[in-house]
Image (cartoon, helix red, strand yellow):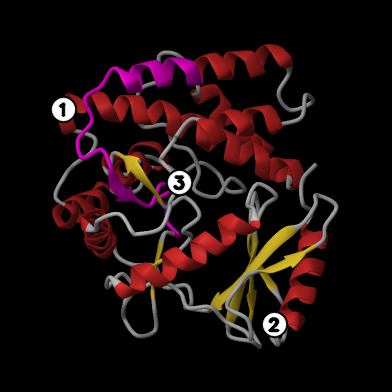
């Protein structure tokens, strides 16, 4: 069972009023596991966290955001009367809703993102508990969560076997900088250029310790190779960050990470397609890429699964 847009909108309206915020004209920004809305009359953004996010998780994200700001890494500030998340009932059980100042839609440049991640990765672990990085468990749970009509038993078994092979290859590698602080889910919405001009780190639910920081940098190489993002953007990021993750140690770690990225990318499209059928063709394309061995790059996935696949970039 997934959270429908209608249900998440109802939750946002109720939670916003409890926070003293005007929800009129709430605009959906992001579907999927979490539903994100802009509240144009309140100058705020609301996130309805998926059922896998406990209250403890949501509170930890708030604490992590405060701690990062104290270390010089900008994060969105809470909006509304209460700092803590609002808990709301839903058909999926209690869900956490958080509100933050609306920073707009201006993305950081690749170079700004590289500098922001370099700063994040330079920090020591905080004095409160963060999850230990595990790129496998949530993926396994997401495979199991897809309904049988979408993922038949035989194919489900194949994806679990594909993930197990990636885990074995991961464990056989010598990873750099294990134990560092990492974002865990770097993408186009990982950082926003605030009106103040400060590159701001967002979506902290996967912030964790104990993993290779190379994982965050590899996500930028992945966007170049799979979505056809221009190579100059990758070069700009790498110049600021300091490492080309796709070439580190002869590319062996990147090949292993690409397996996990491929599976995650398919699951994301398949989850979107549960409530947005026009995304199914992109889910099918991504499913075909989850193969052993992986197909050669570029894959030409679409950044928006409702749009035609982009042509390869120079």
- Can residue 171 be seen in this snapshot? yes
Q: Residue under label 2, please give it.
A: 19
Q: Is residue 183 left or right of residue 271?
A: left
Q: Residues within 10 Å of mark 1 (few under 14, many from 20)?
A: few
**What's the mark number on residue 51?**
none
Q: Residues within 10 Å of mark 3 (few under 14, many from 20)?
A: few
Q: Quadrant of the N terminus?
A: top right
Disc 2 is placed on an element classified as loop
Please tell me whether residue 152 belongs to the stretch shown in magenta.
no
Estimate the x, y position of residue 23 in percent, counting from the top left. Answer: 73, 81
Q: Is residue 200 above or below residue 225?
A: below
Please tell me whether residue 168 belongs to the stretch shown in magenta.
yes
Q: Identify the residue shown where x is 49% and y is 48%.
A: 303
Q: Is residue 177 above or below residue 11?
A: above
| Residue segment shown in magenta | 163-189
Q: Residue under label 1, please give it.
A: 249
Q: Is residue 4 above or below residue 2?
A: below
Disc 1 is placed on an element classified as helix
Q: Nearer the viewer, mark 1 or mark 3?
A: 3
**What is the CA distance from the residue labelled 1 to the residue labelled 3?**
27 Å
Estimate the x, y position of residue 206 in percent, counting from the top left. Answer: 47, 50
Q: Is residue 82 above or below residue 302?
A: below
Q: Residue under label 3, please give it.
A: 131
Q: Mark 2 vs mark 1: which is more N-terminal? A: 2
Q: Nearer the viewer, mark 3 or mark 2?
A: 3
**What is the CA distance from the residue labelled 2 to the residue labelled 1?**
50 Å
């Amino acid at each position: 069972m997934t959270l429908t847009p209608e249900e998440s909108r109802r939750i946002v309206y109720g939670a916003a009023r409890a926070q003293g915020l005007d929800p009129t004209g709430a605009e959906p920004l992001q579907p999927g596991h979490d539903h994100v809305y802009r509240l144009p009359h309140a100058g705020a953004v609301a996130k309805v966290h998926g059922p896998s996010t406990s209250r403890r998780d949501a509170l930890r994200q708030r604490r992590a955001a405060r701690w990062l700001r104290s270390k010089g890494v900008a994060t969105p500030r809470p909006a509304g009367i209460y700092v803590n998340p609002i808990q709301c009932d839903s058909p999926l059980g209690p869900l956490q809703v958080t509100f933050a100042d609306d920073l707009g839609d201006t993305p950081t440049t690749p170079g700004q993102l590289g500098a922001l991640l370099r700063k994040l990765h330079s920090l020591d672990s905080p004095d409160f508990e963060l999850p230990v990085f595990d790129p496998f468990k949530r993926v396994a749970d997401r495979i199991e969560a897809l309904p049988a009509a979408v993922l038949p038993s035989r194919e489900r078994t194949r994806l679990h076997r594909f993930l197990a092979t990636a885990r074995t290859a991961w464990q056989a590698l010598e990873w750099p900088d294990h134990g560092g602080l990492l974002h865990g889910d770097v993408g186009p919405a990982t950082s926003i250029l605030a009106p103040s001009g400060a590159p701001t780190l967002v979506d902290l639910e996967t912030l964790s310790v104990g993993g290779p920081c190379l994982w965050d940098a590899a996500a930028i190489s992945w966007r170049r190779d799979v979505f056809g993002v221009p190579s100059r953007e990758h070069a700009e990021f790498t110049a600021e960050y300091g490492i080309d993750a796709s070439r580190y140690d002869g590319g062996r770690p990147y090949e292993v990470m690409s397996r996990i990225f491929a599976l995650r990318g398919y699951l994301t499209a398949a989850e979107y397609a549960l409530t947005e059928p026009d995304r199914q063709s992109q889910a099918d394309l991504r499913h075909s890429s989850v193969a052993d061995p992986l197909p050669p790059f570029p894959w030409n996935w679409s950044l928006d699964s409702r749009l035609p696949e982009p042509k390869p970039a120079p």
